[in-house]
Amino acid sequence: MSDNNIPLSRYAQLAGREVHWLEWGAPEAPVVIAWHGLARTCRDMDELAQHFASRGFRVICPDTIGRGLSQWSPLPDEEYKLAFYARIANALCDELRLGRVHWVGTSMGGAIGTVCASGLFEPRMKARIASLVLNDNAPELAQPAIERIRAYAGQPPAFDTVAELEAFFRTVYKPYGWLSDAQWRRLTESSTRRLPDGRVTPHYDPAMVRQFSAHDNDYLIWPHYDAIEAPVLCLRGAESDLVLPGVIEEMERRGPGAAGRLQVIEVPACGHAPALNVPEQLEPIEGFIRAAGR
């Protein structure tokens, strides 16, 4: 058990790889799984985890393989893809003996939640996911934005100093919206590793970007979205270049949208993707999850 501000740091072999996650709150509480974006780490979810843990939830925040403290894949073309991430998610739920969970996913984390909630890759996950929050993610993403992300993520820069790396992060992640100086510093320090020559670089496996070349349409997941039976909340950054308004309209016409189970909130002063670090973003998510129940 952890208190609301000091998480447990845990590791386990899941689907054959060592996976790291942080765990907040009481073990018997309703569970929220909070999954980070493509080139990020579980520490992006600290504010969300603290918010929900202080309100009676247990929050599980994994590092995807190839990111943060989780193992890098020796088989990048086979394992850096949504189907394998869903397999890891299923194994994590087995490891922790989780029944029903609420899923909050930023960007890639939302796509993993979508393919889990559909049950098309991992059938047992469909019944496990009680609600799904997509933070600036959708079943179809704008190709120019994908190419932009692929370009910077596939060739991470290296700097002599952490201060220079923080300046880079402040530029590339400016669309996150407002972060305090302390939050920018934590974002930097929690996603930094040193190279053999002593320089610092973002803390992930650059090969993870091969998901886009080895699996061309891995993020085109309309069949998964259509199969979702859980309620869905989509937060779209008002300035997002990844989730376009036309795709939101299509989401409203089909799958959970056609069934009346989709809510959409546009988050002002953010692009891709809202940082989920302020009450204006966290409170609507809490209200949605509470309405979905256990």
Image (cartoon, rainbow, N blue to C red):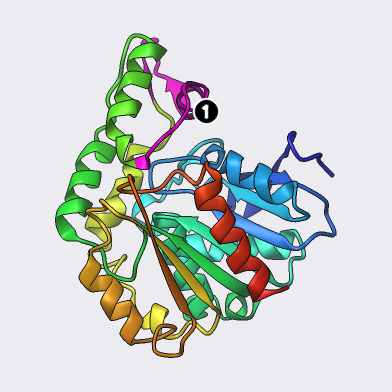
Disc 1 packing (10 Å; few <14; some 14–19; many ≥20): some
Q: Farthest residue in the left direction?
A: 144
Q: Residue 291 placed where, x, y %?
A: 65, 73
In the image, is residue 193 part of the stretch drawn in magenta?
yes
Q: Which residue is depicted at the point 25% across and 56% down?
A: 242
Q: Residue 204 placed where, x, y %?
A: 42, 36
Q: Nearer the viewer, residue 288 or 190?
A: 288
Is 44 situated left or right of 20 in this image? left
Is 167 situated left or right of 51 in this image? left
Q: Amino acid at mark 1?
A: Ser
Answer above or below: position of 39 versus 94.
Answer: above
The residue that mark 1 highlights is 190
Q: Which residue is depicted at the point 45% across and 46% down?
A: 73
Answer above or below: position of 215 versus 184.
Answer: below
In the image, is residue 225 part of the stretch drawn in magenta?
no
Q: Residue 252 placed where, x, y %?
A: 34, 81
Q: Residue 274 placed where, x, y %?
A: 41, 47
Is residue 75 at least partly visible in the picture?
Answer: yes
**Residue 284 occupies which quadrant of the picture?**
bottom right
In the rendered image, which quarter contains the C terminus? bottom right
